[in-house]
Image (cartoon, rainbow, N blue to C red):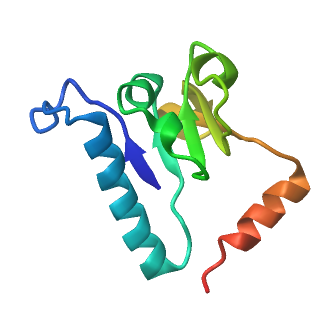
Amino acid sequence: MLDMEWNPFSPTCQRRPDAAVVRSEMRIWLDKVEAHFGQRPVIYTTPRFYEDAGLSAMKNEEFWLRTTAKTPAQAFPGQRWRFWQYTATGTLPNTPGAVDINAFNGTKADWQNWLASRSVR
């Protein structure tokens, strides 16, 4: 997973490079991780970062999209996605505090195939 989002509350995350630089550095990281582990990481992002960094230009990548106020089609028009984080205020039995809840974009068979494609080689 490559988590790409702006964090205005972090003292170490104030710099916002040019979109082309961001995408170039993302590709370098994705390529290195894929070469080492044999599988391409999924990109997790927010609507603001996606738009600011022009991530729609990153064709053929898998995305995990965070959007709690809109659907992925509304927040990321035309973008294919594998996962959708639709809330950060979920609850689980025996788990204190709020948790993220996500959806997989596909059928049960799609899920099984995706898992099989991610097995350690």
Compared to 80, does 113 lie above or below? below
Compared to residue 44, the image places residue 119 above or below, namely: below
Q: Position of residue 20 (x, y in %)?
A: 31, 41
Query: Which percent across, then down, holds residue 66?
Result: 53, 30
Q: Looking at the picture, tell me which residue is in the foreground, 32 or 88.
A: 32
Q: Going 63% across and 35% down the picture, which residue do you hit?
A: 84
Please name the residue shown 62% across and 14% down the image: 70
Q: Position of residue 54 (x, y in %)?
A: 42, 32
Q: In the shown orientation, is residue 10 left or right of residue 1?
A: left
Residues 91 and 41: in front is 41
**On the rendered structure, is 95 left or right of 11?**
right
Which quadrant is home to the C terminus?
Answer: bottom right
Please give the name of the residue rendered at 56% of the width and 35% of the height, measured from the top-left corner: 65
Outermost residue on the left side: it is 11
Front in this rendered view, residue 67 or 87: 67
Q: How many marks?
A: 0
The extreme bottom residue here reads 121
Q: Position of residue 61 (x, y in %)?
A: 57, 52
Residue 117, by quadrant, is: bottom right
